[in-house]
Image: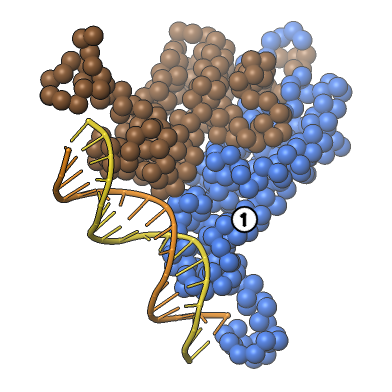
Chain colours: A blue, B brown, C yellow, D orange
DNA sequence: GTCTATACAAAGATAGAC
DNA sequence: GTCTATCTTTGTATAGAC
């Protein structure tokens, strides 16, 4: 047994740093659960510490303040969050690229509900802690992908559409399944955890966005 | 001067009830502002009273507890919120009905940002105070309008689509402009208050949803 | 109806022992 | 690194005077 995770003794214990990081991650996970439900102010350190299985004092040893903890959680999310849009590439057909993007985003809504909700909460509050990064990184990323979409349109592969609004529609529509899951469950009686409902969700969004609702006329 | 709004004397003063209701409404408005930003727990009565221009004690005279106030605010929202979907009617063409619905909902996102956000917050938290009404009224309403959509599909006026998912797409997409306004402003530099941006938003959503993105083939 | 004063609990954060 | 005890602030709510 080379590693003793609970060893509280000396300084340069092998595995000590790892154990410390593991505990920090446990606290972040608990924080995500509570922040995503009640927001920064609404969640208490008491409740977070309880959920993480540590004492409040101990939590404050790892994260010196509530806000530091909150920022630390948000930071982790942003990385996950911008991944799918990065994958959009001019070499793909728009059908494949957008269809795939929809699927990936619905998967995110299924597998990372809490992240989606915390992100949403932060936006609703005016994103005081994320505004900078939105205006820098995200804006640049969207601009880059908008060019790809315009390239498709110029090549006649896509009907004319404002790329920004297309992106907003894709975001809004897919995130809705995470943020409003309660409403969806109240109405449809299903969640994305149900494989059939998941596939139906992806399929319907893809069909509406790509093909539209109105029957095609015979003429061009 | 038959009406003395500030008269603190007797009981059956004419205009007394009206003045009382006006003050209650001012408190509700202030509560909406703060609840929609920080949630039920995150908003303090102190801040709400301050925003409404009354003392905290006085606020508690009109609304005996924080939760009562919160519920009172939510109740008002729900009515506004279900209005647009009620207007959907089988006698319209689907193009007109859905096109109009999109416009109305984007108007809501422009004119009732705070309501949209508070509704979103409540959903994210699992809608503890609204779940009942969602499962009853809203579910029935959606079921009714889904029949209209299916009627259109059966008549060949609409391509086959699951009505529920269509409704979720319309909700998600339009509300996004209220709830994620900060993000949109960070990227596009515009808000729905800008008439051009408003029209572009309505137009693009309508075009994507009704017409789709892929160019029509020559054949049927 | 409105105010001052206050009770009482919860919550963030620190001090210091071990 | 972890714990107990404690300080301080904030926040909901009530009592009672005017």
Q: Residue at 73% across / 48% down in the picture? A: A83
* Residue A16 seen: yes
Q: Which residue is mark 1?
A: A71
- Residue count near mark 1 (Cα–Cα under 10 Å), binned few <14, some 14–19, many ≥20: some
Badge 1: chain ID: A
Identify the image quadrant of the C terminus of chain A. Answer: top right
Q: Is residue D9 left or right of residue A159?
A: left
Q: Is residue C13 left or right of residue B86?
A: right
Q: Residue at 53% across / 13% down in the picture? A: B100
Q: Residue A132 at x, y = what percent?
A: 70, 44
**Secondary structure type for disc 1:** helix
Q: Residue at 46% across / 40% down in the picture? A: B121
Foreground pick, B122 / A126:
A126
To which quarter of the image does residue B195 belong?
Answer: top right
Foreground pick, B116 / A94:
B116
A1, above or below B74, in the image: below
To which quarter of the image does residue A176 belong?
Answer: top right
Q: Residue at 49% across / 25% down in the picture? A: B112
A10, above or below B157, in the image: below
Q: Residue B188 at x, y = what percent?
A: 71, 29
């Amino acid at each position: 047994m080379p590693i003793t995770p609970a060893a509280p003794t000396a300084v340069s214990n092998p595995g000590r740093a790892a154990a410390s990081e593991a505990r920090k991650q446990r606290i972040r996970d608990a924080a995500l659960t509570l922040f995503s439900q009640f927001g920064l102010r609404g969640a208490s350190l008491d409740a977070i510490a309880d959920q993480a299985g540590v004492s409040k004092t101990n939590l404050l040893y790892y994260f010196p303040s509530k806000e530091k903890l909150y920022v630390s959680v948000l930071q982790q999310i942003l990385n996950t969050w911008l991944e799918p849009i990065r994958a959009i590439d001019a070499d793909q057909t728009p059908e494949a690229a957008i269809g795939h993007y929809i699927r990936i985003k619905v998967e995110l809504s299924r597998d990372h509900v809490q992240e989606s909700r915390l992100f949403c909460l932060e936006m609703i509050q005016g994103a005081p802690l994320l505004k900078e990064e939105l205006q820098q990184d995200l804006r640049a990323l969207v601009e880059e992908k908008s060019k790809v979409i315009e390239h498709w349109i110029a090549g006649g592969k896509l009907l004319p559409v404002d790329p920004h609004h297309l992106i907003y529609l894709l975001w809004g529509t897919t995130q809705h399944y995470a943020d409003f899951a309660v409403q969806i469950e109240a109405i449809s009686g299903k969640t994305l955890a149900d494989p059939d409902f998941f596939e139906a969700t992806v399929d319907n969004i893809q069909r509406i966005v790509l093909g539209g609702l109105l029957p095609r006329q015979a003429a061009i």
